[in-house]
Amino acid sequence: MSTAPPGRRGASGRRVALVTLGCGRNEVDSEELAGRLAEDGWDVITGVTDAADVGDADVALVNTCGFVEAAKKDSIDTVLQAADSKGSGRTRAVVAVGCLAERYGETLADALPEADAVLGFDDYPDISARLDAILAGETHVPHAPQDRRRLLPLAPAERASRTVRDVPDLPAGLGPASGPRPVRLRLGDGPAAPLKLASGCDRRCTFCAIPTFRGSFVSRRPAEVLGEARWLAERGVRELVLVSENSTSYGKDLGDLRLLETLLPELAAVDGVDRVRVSYLQPAEMRPGLVEVMTSTDGVAPYFDLSFQHASGPVLRRMRRFGDTERFLELIGRIRTASPDAGIRSNVIVGFPGERDEDLAELEQFLTGARLDAVGVFGYSDEDGTEAAGFDGKVPEDVVRDRVERVSRLVDELVSQRAEDRVGEPVEVLVEAVDRVESGGVAEGRAAHQAPEVDGTCSVRGLAPADLVVGRFVRASVTGSDGADLVAAAG
């Protein structure tokens, strides 16, 4: 399926397909790139989920992820897969954008000649001209990577003076101004969509390189966020998933560190929006007022995506993070006192330099006591440009693998137990797919404690035909579970 603004479809004869890897922030970036291209007359092919589907495009634009080694490899493999379509279809150019492209620039271009160009974030405002030049046979000179934290003032309050360009009279189908990014074009039609709160990060975790290529933390103004929320709702979005590198910092550069507590009720009140979900919360920055708003506001999911990373105090200090088992369990207790059915998920890193057997045991003790709904387990590996890459006390790779397997087995068991505990619990499920059969039908969707793609799903049986509609919220009762996935009966 192809989508472009009315009156512009195919006007230039240029077609582009975007393949998006990584997180919800990348999804928004892809839709903003698509908006820019559609505004300039490109025919944007929507619904592309695999590089094998780009053969009908002149340009395959691969929005890469550069977070961890597995994501980097997946990004490179996707570029190579897209390059295979050249010669077998219409595709004439494969272009890499996104975090991996920004992070490595000229180095990636040298190592990946199959890509016709590697573009950085500074190329985004002129993306149409860049692709036109590439199709014309011009050689693009890739950028030399830089530490993007140095592009803005150190003091967050000084960043608010940046200019935001308005785009009046947008073509139908394109979104409103979004910081310095002028437009957005939805590439899918699902009833949930990410909405970017901010970009960048001011934290200095020793294992993480994201701030160096995403830059310092910059909040979007509430009016921009609300405007885009209304635009998404007008296009059938029922659930907004708020994304950023650190949502708990929202508003600090605008002079109000509690701005998220004010914004959430306003987003939940947007006509057409039934559920607002917040992602990427820092445990050290969780405020009692934020917990209260997230657990008591109608339309805001009591869902806490808390980045614990570990539970051993000494390991967390080496990570340049705060907290420990006692503090984390206390936070979880406060959340569940306010909302017993609240969803809580996290990610943990095992095998960090200096991690001892007793540190791993403490992490396991924490996970057992926390009863989280979902946990991502990652083995530590050195990341270019991070402080931890130079640490002593490196854990051997085979030991890291063993620890990942050990903690993953524990997590699988604990997550399954947590899902079983929800049997008998009432849930409100956003229908995202429908499987109709003669005797009825099954709706596949997500309950309030389940974020898209990462936290399992909920299958609802026994619905009336009128409720077997994508985008409908349905009430059900949990009757069973399979891992993190739930089975529920209507009513």
Image: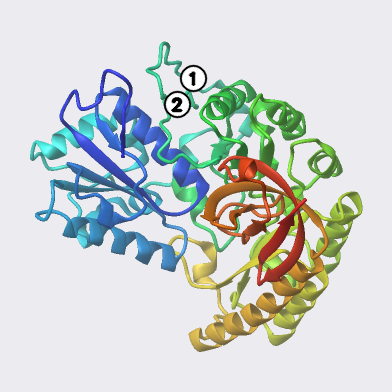
- The image quadrant that residue 2 belongs to is top left
Q: Which mark is residue 180?
A: 2
Q: Which mark is residue 163?
A: 1
Neighbourhood count class around disc 2 (C-alpha, 10 Å): few under 14, some 14–19, many 20 upward = few
In x, y percent, where is residue 360?
Answer: 70, 81
In x, y percent, where is residue 424?
Answer: 83, 62
Q: Residue furthest toward the top?
A: 169
> Residue at 46% across / 36% down in the picture?
151
In x, y percent, where is residue 149?
Answer: 49, 42
- Amino acid at circle 2: Pro
> Which mark is first along the chain, 2 or 1?
1
Q: Is residue 122 above or below residue 447?
A: above
**Left or right side of 421 for 19:** left
Dot 2: element: loop
User: Can you see residue 108?
Assistant: no
Residue nearest the observer in this picture, 38 or 306: 38
